[in-house]
């Protein structure tokens, strides 16, 4: 298998975005956030170890309402990157097009996010990693003990 | 509103590419007055995103210039964008980038 580092070698998978009719129906105990700019209700949940972002339409003009109407539920993959601008430059070389401005996202503690789209691979969200978090994760990824084959 | 005929040609080529994949009744209008974005537009967000990607690639191939249509649209502060509006904005941006290399042929 060939590995492609579309968003840079330090990009880490973060979550899958799923469209749902009702977040509370999926997860009655969910904390639901209202994101008026994107016209969605958002909630995160873990599913077999994978983080899912549940997106419920906020009103009929929400783009998510159209996705649901068209039967499209798997919306995007999100990757966390240490440097958004570098990731954007790399992604463009791989055929991704930026389709939004990089904006702070309240749900990610005001870290910047941006949307990119590839005709071949579809919609991706890039979220700038909290630097401390990235550093900690890199340290955690380093083998703590010697590995033997 | 003035646009390069060559840019409009690229625009139509991108529209044709996207319309090949569009569902019936959801094709992008192929005329300068066709509305791409705004209250009276029938173009959905996915179709528009596909058009933007196709057009950015065409511009890059034709002029060797990377352009962000999203930035152009945000900087325009217009609520409604026709095909001619977008072609004019692309033409202005290319004229700005390719100083001393005026684009051939203008429309409107």
Image: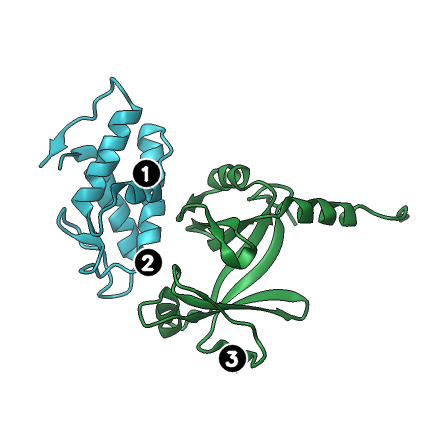
Say which element carries label 2: helix
**Horizontal side of residue A15 vs B20, given as left or right:** right
State the separation of the CA atoms marked 1 and 3.
Answer: 44 Å
Task: Kindly identify which residue carries mark 3.
Answer: A24
Q: Nearer the viewer, mark 2 or mark 3?
A: 3
Say which element carries label 1: helix
State the separation of the CA atoms marked 2 and 1.
Answer: 20 Å
Q: Are marks 2 and 3 on the same chain?
A: no
Point out the residue furthest to the left here.
Answer: B108
Q: Nearer the viewer, mark 1 or mark 3?
A: 3
Q: Nearer the viewer, mark 2 or mark 1?
A: 2
Label 3: chain?
A
Residue depicted at x 41% and y 51%: A119
**Horizontal side of residue B27 vs A23, given as left or right:** left
Residue B58: mark: 1
Measured from the top left, where is residue A123 in percent x and y? 46, 55
Which hue is chain B drawn in?
cyan
Q: Which chain is green?
A: A
Q: Is residue A76 above or below residue B56?
A: below
Measured from the top left, where is residue A104 in percent x and y? 48, 50
Task: Kindly identify which residue carries mark 2.
Answer: B45
Q: Is residue B98 above or below residue A49?
A: above
**Horizontal side of residue B93 vs A91, given as left or right:** left
**Horizontal side of residue A46 vs B101, given as left or right:** right
Residue depicted at x 22% and y 33%: B91
| Residue A57 figure quarter | bottom left
Residue depicted at x 35% and y 36%: B67
Measured from the top left, where is residue B3 in percent x and y? 16, 35
Label 1: chain?
B
Point out the residue furthest to the top here.
Answer: B100
């Amino acid at each position: 298998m060939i590995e492609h580092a579309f968003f840079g070698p330090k990009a880490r998978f973060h979550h899958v975005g799923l469209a749902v009719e009702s977040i509370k129906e999926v997860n009655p105990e969910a904390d639901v956030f209202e994101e008026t700019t994107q016209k969605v209700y958002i909630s995160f949940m873990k599913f077999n170890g994978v983080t899912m972002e549940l997106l419920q339409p906020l009103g009929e003009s929400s783009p998510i309402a159209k996705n649901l109407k068209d039967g499209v539920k798997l919306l995007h993959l999100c990757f966390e990157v240490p440097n958004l601008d570098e990731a954007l430059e790399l992604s463009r070389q791989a055929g991704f097009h930026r389709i939004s401005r990089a904006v702070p996202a309240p749900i990610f503690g005001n870290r910047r996010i941006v949307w990119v789209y590839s005709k071949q691979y579809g919609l991706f969200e890039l979220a700038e990693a909290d630097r401390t978090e990235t550093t900690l994760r890199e340290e955690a990824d380093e083998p703590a003990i010697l590995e033997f084959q | 509103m003035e646009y390069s005929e060559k840019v409009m040609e690229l625009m139509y080529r991108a529209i044709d590419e996207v319309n090949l994949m569009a569902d019936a009744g959801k094709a992008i209008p192929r005329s300068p007055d066709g509305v791409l974005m705004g209250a009276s537009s029938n173009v959905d967000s996915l179709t528009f995103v596909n058009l933007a990607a196709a057009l950015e690639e065409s511009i890059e191939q034709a002029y060797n210039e990377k352009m962000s249509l999203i930035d152009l649209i945000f900087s325009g502060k217009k609520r409604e964008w026709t095909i001619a509006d977008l072609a004019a904005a692309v033409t202005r941006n290319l004229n700005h980038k390719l100083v001393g290399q005026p684009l051939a042929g203008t429309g409107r």
